[in-house]
Amino acid sequence: MPTSHRHQIAILGLGGIGSAAFHELSRRGIDVIGIDRERPPHELGSSHGQSRIFRVAYFEHPDYVPLAIRARERWVEIEANDSRRVFIPTGGAWVGKEDGRHVGDSRMAADLHGLRYDMLDGSETTKRWPALRVPDGQVCFHEPDAGVVCPEHAIRHFLENGEEHGGRVLCGQTIKSVRPEDDGVRILLERDEIIAEKVICALGPWTDDLVRTPDVELQPTRQLLGWTRPSNPMSLREGRLPVWLFADDDETIQYGFPLCDRLPGSSGAKVARHYQLEACDPDTVDRVIGEADEAFLTRELETRIPAAAGPLIDARVCMYTMSRDEHFVIDRHPDHDRVIMACGFSGHGFKFAPAIGEGLADIALEGKSRLSMNFLSSARFKHE
């Protein structure tokens, strides 16, 4: 018989979102347990890879901006209270057509919310950052409040700080079932059984295996991260280059990071693409990087940021869990009021982690969030 434990709130999955919620609930003095099959941070899900872009002028939708502003406040606070590098303010340079999604909608969000930005032509961009080359017919949107978040350091901060405040972390056991009952939610593990008053489900690509949500369709996809041996590393150093993004088209981007000291993993120049590629199963996803993957990652570096061009010296596979409209799903389960869903982060959720952690704690304790998150409710899918 499994050993039974009771807690006020259980969090399933301790990636960026789950660990942030664990941290926030622990800070509030709540009896919380966080559960993960592995010991986070690890490389089997979505919350790894050395760095994530942080943005405020949000081209996906201007409704994200208040959430991003709050997240930045929290990242700055976390950075000031941790010896590791968690948040690095570098500014951001987004290159594309002036009326395209990545530049035009960033500008719209910035104007709507009164954010600082610069619009630069090609010569102005290269004068400011010699490594960047703006293609003919395109412009650069510069966002000074952008930066880099380190997922590994952030997750360690959330979990360590949460444990210091009394939260419990339970790792190394697979979750076999999640059963909502009249007086709580029963979580059956390999060796233990957890009974919680409320559950926050932050399982990423494993969400549908354990907690299906009516009207919400989630699809894990295979994604690539790579690090090159740059031809001119000095021009890519932190302070000489912001985080950068080039629009392939209105749906996909190539992006990368300055060379920052004291981050985990490879010492090369990180490049990646945000795109929808093949659907995958999170337990059988192909983690081998082939020649086609390498070519896809490094294509166009020579013309866009030639200083970063060079042989690929390291690469990783991660996963996006895509919702149908590529926006997050943060809501109570429509059939089980004790279960709170946090899923469908679609490759752009990690930057919001500390703010979403606050919002999830609010929902679990008070029934709704004080932050502006209603636009992420699952109810939107019922009206499609």
Image (tube, helix red, strand yellow):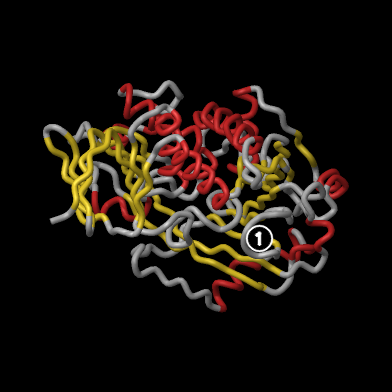
Local packing at callout 1 (Cα closer than 10 Å; few below 14, some 14-19, many 20+) is many
Q: Report the residue that reaches farthest toward the bottom.
A: 291
Could you tell me which quadrant the C terminus lies in?
Answer: top left
Asked whether the viewer can see residue 94, the reply is yes
**Quadrant showing the N terminus:** bottom left
Determine whether 363 is above or below 82 in the image. above
User: Which residue is painted at 48% across and 75% down in the image?
Assistant: 288
Label 1 sits on a secondary structure element that is: strand
Up-down relation of residue 92 to residue 290 (above or below): above
| Residue 306 percent location from the top left of the image | 78, 63
Q: How many marks?
A: 1
Q: Which residue is mark 1?
A: 270
Disc 1 residue type (three-letter): Lys
178 vs 355, left or right, is left
Which of the 4 quarters of the picture holds residue 316?
bottom right
Residue 159 at x, y percent in the picture = 47, 44
Q: Position of residue 186 (x, y in %)?
A: 18, 44
Viewer-side residue, 143 vs 68: 68
**Residue 384 seen anywhere in this rendered image of the structure:** no
In percent of width and height, residue 314 lies at 62, 70
Task: Tell me: 189 left or right of 48.
Answer: left
Left or right of 336 on screen, residue 150? right
The quadrant in which residue 254 appears is bottom right
